[in-house]
Amino acid sequence: MDNFSRYISQIKFFGFEKNKRIQETSVAVIGLGGLGSWLSEFLVRIGVKNLAIVDFDIVEEKNLNRQNFIIDDIGKLKIDSIEKRLKEVDNSVNIEKYKEINNKIFNRDIIFDCTDNIKSKYLINELSVYYNKPYIFASVVMDQGFVGLINPEQFCLYDIYKGKEDVLTCNITGVDFSAVIFAVSLMLKLFINYVFGNRDGILYHFNIRDKFYLEEIKVKSNNCKICKRKQFELIWNYLK
Ligand SMILES: [Zn+2]
């Protein structure tokens, strides 16, 4: 049973076959903060049935202003609260929970990097190149951010950030919730495009301060240490 009535508006727009492809795609969402807590729910709402969710953190009161948690969740693991939420949205969904990044999640069709620190981002990037697995990432600070699809055969995150570690994060600068949700919306659209066959790497920069501003940035990968020369540094403990 494909639950036709649940997805009727989507089927009208995308067609039956494409709607089915969304349901057949397995994903992993790494990081259940402002980005991942919403993205995982929206993925389930559009029909994704198989998710791995990854986060070691517990829910705190300060998360409630922009993350997909409620008062009752405070003190609980984010993976447990999000699992409960996703099953409330669709009780047929199949969820695997992990506190740490591991090699199992790279069996999924596509990975989402929703982490908010650059070290995790470089780790996910190296694993994605190692396993030749595309992923969608976002990074939001204040009222601007980057969102992209990394296809390791074309370019990787290292080509964007060049190995810098002093990249600003929302923990330092604070963040505008509308920018977070804007990034989630772009991630969802990149996912839909990916499922429908558009696998090319792409990078967007956006800024919603005064006017809405969105541009595509062309990324060049010249002899990149990670995606071209495969000089991995971070992944060796994660391949077991
Ligand atoms: Zn690269």
Image (tube, rainbow, N blue to C red):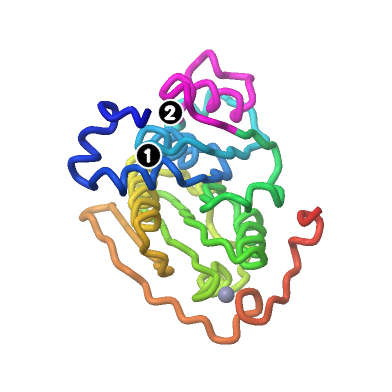
Q: Is residue 83 magenta?
A: yes
SS state under label 2: loop
Extreme bottom residue here? 223
The x, y position of residue 72, in whole percent, is 53, 13
The residue that mark 1 highlights is 177
Task: State how many labels appear.
Answer: 2
| Residue range corresponding to the magenta coloring | 68-95
Occupied quadrant, residue 65 = top left
- Circle 1: residue type: Phe
Label 2 close to label 1 by CB (< 8 Å): yes
Give the residue displayed 31% in from the left and 57% down from the top.
207
Left or right position of 202 against 128: left
**Vertical placement of residue 227 versus 135, above or below:** below
Circle on res. 100: none
Give the residue displayed 64% in from the left and 28% down from the top.
58
Is ligand 1 within 8 Å of the beta carbon of the residue shown at mark 2? Answer: no
Sequence-earlier tag: 2 or 1 = 2
Left or right position of 30 against 232: left
The x, y position of residue 141, in whole percent, is 45, 51
| Residue nearest the viewer, comparing 92 with 147 | 92
Report crowding for label 2: few under 14, some 14 to 19, many 20 or more residues within 10 A (C-alpha).
few
SS state under label 1: helix
The residue that mark 2 highlights is 65
- Circle 2: residue type: Asn
As measured in the structure, the alpha-carbon distance from the residue carrying label 2 to the one carrying label 1 is: 8 Å
